[in-house]
Image: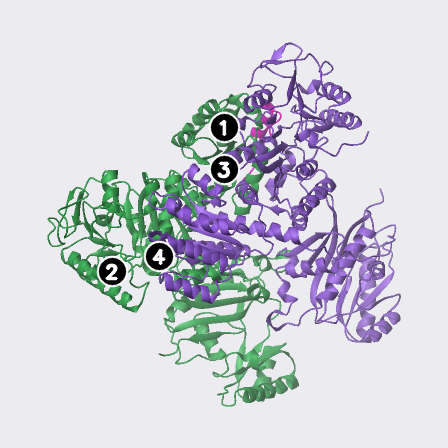
Chain colours: A green, B purple
Amino acid sequence: MSVVNDLSRLLNPKVIAVIGASDDPTRIGGKPISYMVKQGYAGKILPVNPKRDTVQGIKSYPSVDALPDTPDIAIVAVPASAALETITALAKRGTGGAILFSAGFAEMNEEGAAIQNKMAEVATAHGMRLLGPNSLGMLNPQTHFYGTFATGLELGFPEPGNVAIVSQSGAYGAHLMAVAVQNNIGLSAAVMTGNEADLSVGDIVQMVVDDPKTQVIALYSEGVRRADVLVKALESARRKRKPVVMMKVGRSAVGGAAAQSHTASIAGDDRVFDAVMKELGVIRVETTEQMLDIARLATRGIYPADNSLGVITVSGGAGVIISDAAEALGLPMPPMPEKAQKELTEVLPYAAPRNPVDTTAQVLNDMSLLRRFTESLVRDGGYKSILGFFTYTTSAASTGARLRQEIKGVREQYPDRLFVLAAMGSREQMRQYEDDGFAIFEDPSRAVTAIDAMGRFGAAFERPEALPAPVINAVELPQSNPSEAVAKQLLAKAGIESAPESVCKDADQAVAAAQSMGGKVVMKIVSPDILHKSEIGGVLLDIEGAAAVRAGFDTLIERARKAVPNARIEGVLVAKQLSGGVECILGIHRDPVFGPMAMFGLGGIFVEILEDVVLHRCPFGEDVAENMIRSIKGAPLLLGARGRPVADIKALAGMLSRLSAFAVAAGPRLESIDLNPVFAMPEGQGAFAADAVITLKDPD
Amino acid sequence: MSVVNDLSRLLNPKVIAVIGASDDPTRIGGKPISYMVKQGYAGKILPVNPKRDTVQGIKSYPSVDALPDTPDIAIVAVPASAALETITALAKRGTGGAILFSAGFAEMNEEGAAIQNKMAEVATAHGMRLLGPNSLGMLNPQTHFYGTFATGLELGFPEPGNVAIVSQSGAYGAHLMAVAVQNNIGLSAAVMTGNEADLSVGDIVQMVVDDPKTQVIALYSEGVRRADVLVKALESARRKRKPVVMMKVGRSAVGGAAAQSHTASIAGDDRVFDAVMKELGVIRVETTEQMLDIARLATRGIYPADNSLGVITVSGGAGVIISDAAEALGLPMPPMPEKAQKELTEVLPYAAPRNPVDTTAQVLNDMSLLRRFTESLVRDGGYKSILGFFTYTTSAASTGARLRQEIKGVREQYPDRLFVLAAMGSREQMRQYEDDGFAIFEDPSRAVTAIDAMGRFGAAFERPEALPAPVINAVELPQSNPSEAVAKQLLAKAGIESAPESVCKDADQAVAAAQSMGGKVVMKIVSPDILHKSEIGGVLLDIEGAAAVRAGFDTLIERARKAVPNARIEGVLVAKQLSGGVECILGIHRDPVFGPMAMFGLGGIFVEILEDVVLHRCPFGEDVAENMIRSIKGAPLLLGARGRPVADIKALAGMLSRLSAFAVAAGPRLESIDLNPVFAMPEGQGAFAADAVITLKDPD
């Protein structure tokens, strides 16, 4: 039987079995039933408990086999020792999915891991999906399905809404849920995947992408178990314009170690992860607060691809704070049109009408002015996003009611704009503004961060199809790591050019080669047994003239023989020494999670000390490559900063995209490629690799 | 009469006059009286209103002169046109201070500015201090003195506490106050300075530093009107161990422009401001939230100079988030001792005992374990700061009470530790934990930021006295900008060395000079009329041999004559060309707010593109200089990164500190100095300026 991919049966079960059901509503096997009864789940609950006739007042059954209906989902709260047996019985019965609360499997020891694998096998063989083990469960507030024992629900149940929380970690997922409840964020689902024997966060993301109630996805993970599933799910989220905000932790050394020790997950290279999420239009955040701020604003469903921010404020100071925050994020705040500015200043001479539009507290004395200013901001300014800093004046007895009335009028006229208020007041007062169509933040800086994220989602949703990656002929890799010369020949077949060069067997050949190239040459030892040439003094620079070339040849051979006595020496490479270009590094590195990743950076200290590099999954076309090149901090060096010549970006981008295609064509034996340096020559003069190292996986 | 510097009379007035008092408690002249009556101000309120016998039930007087007592402070809510007259009457009467609500002065036009200045003069002449005009006022919740018309108080009054809010902006200050009320932050004062005709934020900071009730200062400003006063106040705050957390806005281009248009303030160079605040131990934040988070935690009065963070968590995921946040801030999280780790694992095999100590939710089943783990963290780990991530389990019906009891026990044993909980629950529940001695944050990342700030305060408070700045002989500046050679001679007298060099009048002298130096030389045109030599081709590098020196001499003279026909040419400078050193830039720039600022950075792209520089007020000793040098991102280049030779940091620090002393000794005519490049030679070989440009202010 094939794996069931439509998980809507799991999210919307009509028949729920609870194996290990407890009459005590505070026990793990009792909580889900208690929660569902309390909240009014309308489907069928079938407790399984061999010792009781009823559980919490509901008729109970002695075994899985004795159940009167086939469960859509089974909540399993049995001891670890009974888990395999229970899962097997459920799978044979045709159950849609099982949620396994029980812990003590892969996170404990090898034996536990073996049982966990066995359970996944049995489930898969019968077409049943498995959540867990060691899962805190899942819930759907739309239908009051509570397949979870999360204690946080004691503080309050989530309201139905359109945000789905997907979390690998149980405890943190439950924390997120509690914060969502606290902040009035309605949920369509919350799923904690635990050990991921079968269902991983990628599967669950796909489930909520396919769920019509879910519009926004908040994703928490410490690593990625099945990258292909996750990437596919995130791609379909982007196609369906469902924003995903993600917190992937383990960025730091300590954090990474902690993540590895937790839930037995795979942390992977954090910078690679960053690059891939950016590519997929996912917004990655650092804090829970950012995640839920962005998710909450995203529920408004307005994602302006060409975002711009217009600000109206009763405090000049707040206007400055907001401007600083917007600039730091790169969110444009263009000024109001001159004409509109003039008109506003005529009405209210104290006002600063540029953007931020600072009305001063004067407007509170004549609220029709507030309306007029807000309208001008929307209509004349044309901003896609509007932020009003009104703080407590939205709610104070002397100002609140009238202020609400005036801005509500503007909101109704322009339903397509993202309208955010920095406001304060009681929960009930804030809820009223939310019902009027405003998103509410207490802190203006947090509002700006969330508004900026909406634009980024929009840009990702509208992003045009990228150019196709270059087509590269099949790459035939040698048996072992190739020498520099062979590496360059392989790359040359894919259109990746090196500086003119020639492998010379003796000093005469070297002299002839150097003469034909003209100018200075670089000389390097060629041997498959010497990969790091510079470490043995195997590279000579600035060689000019026949005598120097001849001496250089002898020096290199001698050094090589001394350093690696049995090295197979194929000769000396003589290459034209390039000058006047900008030194870059292009590379490929196979990531254990996402496969071959291309890297671009500037040479020298930029990579060594500043770690100023950009990464991208392979393969990709020239447009993506050019965006990569332009995105690094040091890019001005290539773009003519301070009177420098503009580099041949087109040629460089072509080389980078061909390298990415080469990496894929070379297949899984390719471990890494280093082109260091590559000389990006002035515009129209090309880009040339001056060195190339290809490293292959050991045959076994 | 001299200016009154003791402002405690203003903060704790016993007699308060209200000029322009209104019987209507919603009017500007009515609000302060209404607030004070409502909150129970115990001193005397003396309304002044010529039209009424009583105001809000209090006996009223027709004029300032008719008042029965001399006011300690007068709240002035009269039309702008009557302000000068009122201020004059108050000043003559011997009033301690006046709070001027009225607007329409310097922020409006020249005429307004003139009246504002006049008011300040009159006040100062009679020893009265003036807050405003255009001020939202001040308040002291300790005594229920409400000299403000802030509408935000309608949402709730602040509780008495030990945080003082000092804000230039009225509206933003009032917003801060409202957020403080919302977050249970007790206040000792809140003061909004407005136009600062007399009292500036610096004066008010001094006032609250001197106030025994104030322990923590939250400062908001868009610029600095009187840098000397502010610097002195911040210095005394550090001496008295009163932490100052500051939000200075206007960081961005848009924000800076907005700040300049608002309240007519001086924004200044933001990076200079950053550097000065760091020097004074002030923590500068970007958001209101950070400001109040840090202020709130600071009220605990625990500032560990050698901060370290121990984390106990019921969620491994949260542990990772916290570790990431701590590493990003540089807050150390050393591991638990091996022995303690072993013991904990024996008690609870699932636990990850390293730090973060992840107990998993298991401890909720046996809370004595929670106590044991927490105790071990404090006692065995010895961390100065403890963060417990317990989220809703602090408050859920099934776990809250017992959890509180257990951790309270540990808290009581170790009152010197900074003990923070990431917790959720009702306001009342959170208040109980706070009363137990815990600081509460919902978001763990925000908790880490605040904990880190406490350590930074501690480090600033404990910072040893810096070395004295070098003593430099009086500097005699020439009448106009000196040539490179003269600049170097001036600097040489202060011990700032250049590479061997000589100004040569003819080609023969140049050849002789080059020969005496040996190796390659640099040749530069010398003319007081040509400051930017390289722009006219007036610098030649890599010159070697008599013929080349001779040709170079002629070339330079010819280029100079052509480019600047009337230039006074003093000759050609021949200097030894240094090699093997690291190129640095040392500079001085006169900041309009803080005076001469020293700058250090690495040469080339580090300064040009990466803006990797450090700034410090002048003068300073070698220890400060060395810290500056080590603090830049590119410092590894000087410290032997990747096999480079270690540079002569001592010599470089000596040069930088002598340059800072030179800048002060040179007096206010010195505009800037550029030593670019300076060669930091390998250890023991010194540091030498290869170029020097001194720019002076025009004589008038």
**Who is closer to the viewer here, A480 or B660?**
B660
Mark 1 residue type: Leu
Could you tell me which residue is drawn at 20 percent across and 61 percent down? A84
Magenta-drawn stretch contains A424: no
- Please report the bounds of the magenta region as a residue range: A333-352
Query: What subunit carries mark 1?
Result: B
**Who is closer to the viewer here, B94 or A652?**
B94
Q: Are marks 1 and 3 in contact (CB under 8 Å)?
A: no
Query: Could you classify mark 4 by the number of other residues whose Cα lies within 10 Å: few (under 14), some (14-19), or many (20 or more)?
Result: some
Residue on which disc 2 sits: A80
Distance from disc 3 to disc 4, alpha carbons, whole Å, reads 41 Å
Residue B183's tag is 3
Residue on which disc 1 sits: B155
Q: Are marks 3 and 4 in contact (CB under 8 Å)?
A: no
In the rendered image, the vertical position of residue A650 relative to residue B97, given as above or below: below
Residue on which disc 4 sits: A231
Residue B458 shown left or right of residue B501 in the figure: left
Question: Which callout, 1 or 3, points at the residue further toward the start of the chain?
Answer: 1
Query: Could you classify mark 1 by the number of other residues whose Cα lies within 10 Å: few (under 14), some (14-19), or many (20 or more)?
Result: some
**Who is closer to the viewer here, A436 or A652?**
A436
Query: Could you classify mark 3 by the number of other residues whose Cα lies within 10 Å: few (under 14), some (14-19), or many (20 or more)?
Result: some
In the rendered image, the vertical position of residue A134 relative to residue A342, given as above or below: below
Residue A53's tag is none
